[in-house]
Image: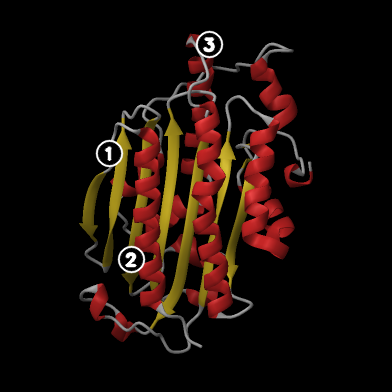
Amino acid sequence: MPPDLNAVRSYLLALQDSICAALEMEDGRARFREDAWTRAEGGGGRSRVLSEGAVFEKAGVGFSHVSGASLPPSATASRPELAGKAFHALGVSLVIHPRNPYVPTSHMNVRFFTTAAAANQGGPIENQKSKIENPTWWFGGGFDLTPYYGFAEDCVHWHRTAQAATGEHYPRFKKWCDDYFYLKHRAEPRGVGGVFFDDFNAPGFEASFSLMRAVGDAFIPAYLPIVKKRKATPHGERERDFQLYRRGRYVEFNLVWDRGTHFGLQSGGRTESILMSLPPLVAWRYDWKPDAGTPEARLYDVFLQPRNWADE
């Protein structure tokens, strides 16, 4: 069956609502500010940012549905047959930067892409066709965890939740995540991984959509138990300094390697919404290395190493 654009859109809007509500409840103080926007070439979205919360220093949860008459270079580099094609791209993407250094930063994204007949472009999204004839389409998504101070039980919980959501696909999606969220210029993983997939359409639309929903729905059960467990852990200036230093790796990955960032900027997306994933404060140090045997060194020695957490 052809993809149902409106069904995907409705799910993503509801997912954004449910995640924001859960994060506000956990924070207990701050609320999301919503910024709705439109894109001249087609589509728009709503960006939500929570700032200076009791638990979350910054959290961004964005929904976007953009369309256009021609794909940007970042989308056609590996798929040259799509050059010049009209398209729809929908997704929810979030990044959470916690206040306490013992709470990991986390990222989640679920998305849908489809080519479209040129006649479907322009005008309000709700007036465009829901079912597109003979399109090229796929789903993608995943979530990953970036701790500053690692805890094995948190990593096991995170990966077992990801495994339950993705089932038989987990081993492949875990490796895909490990490979994708890797800073090649540092020869270093960004964190402890999770799951990641893209260009997914082999079982057909309904099965693929179901998998995407399973990943989106699993994020809060994967992340909030870790937040609850670590958010009151005592910490001082040393832990805060290390948190800011490691946030630099997050910035480097998003700006240098992330396909979603490149697609958004090259397709004329809204810069503020695309870059709302960046942390509010960050620090870089020249050629810094942790002292052997310290908790900071343990992050590198134990947690930023390939490991099958779900099997432990």
Can residue 79 be seen in this snapshot?
no
Can residue 207 be seen in this snapshot?
yes
Q: Amino acid at mark 2?
A: Val
For the residue carrying disc 1, how many other residues have a C-alpha within 10 Å: few (<14), some (14-19), or many (20+)?
some
Q: Are marks 1 and 2 in contact (CB under 8 Å)?
A: no
Q: How many marks?
A: 3
Q: Is residue 124 above or below residue 144?
A: below
The answer for how far apart the CA atoms under marks 1 and 2 are is 26 Å
Work out which quarter of the rendered image holds the C terminus and state it.
top right
Residue 166 vs residue 293: left or right? left
Most foreground residue, 165 or 261: 165
**Residue at the (26%, 67%) spot, across then down:** 41
Residue 264 vs residue 215: left or right? left
**Residue at the (40%, 37%) spot, across then down:** 26
For marks 1 and 2 on the same chain, the one whose residue lies earlier in the sequence: 1
Check disc 3 and report its element: helix, strand or loop.
Answer: helix
Residue identifier under label 1: 31
Dividing the picture into quarters, in which one does residue 281 lie?
top left
Q: Position of residue 199 (x, y in %)?
A: 58, 68
Q: Position of residue 58 (x, y in %)?
A: 37, 34
Residue identifier under label 2: 66
Q: Position of residue 148 (x, y in %)?
A: 57, 26
For marks 3 and 1 on the same chain, the one whose residue lies earlier in the sequence: 1
Depth check, mark 3 against mark 1: the one in front is 1
Depth check, mark 2 against mark 3: the one in front is 3
Residue identifier under label 3: 238
Check disc 2 and report its element: helix, strand or loop.
Answer: strand
Residue 299 vs residue 144: left or right? right
Check disc 1 and report its element: helix, strand or loop.
Answer: loop
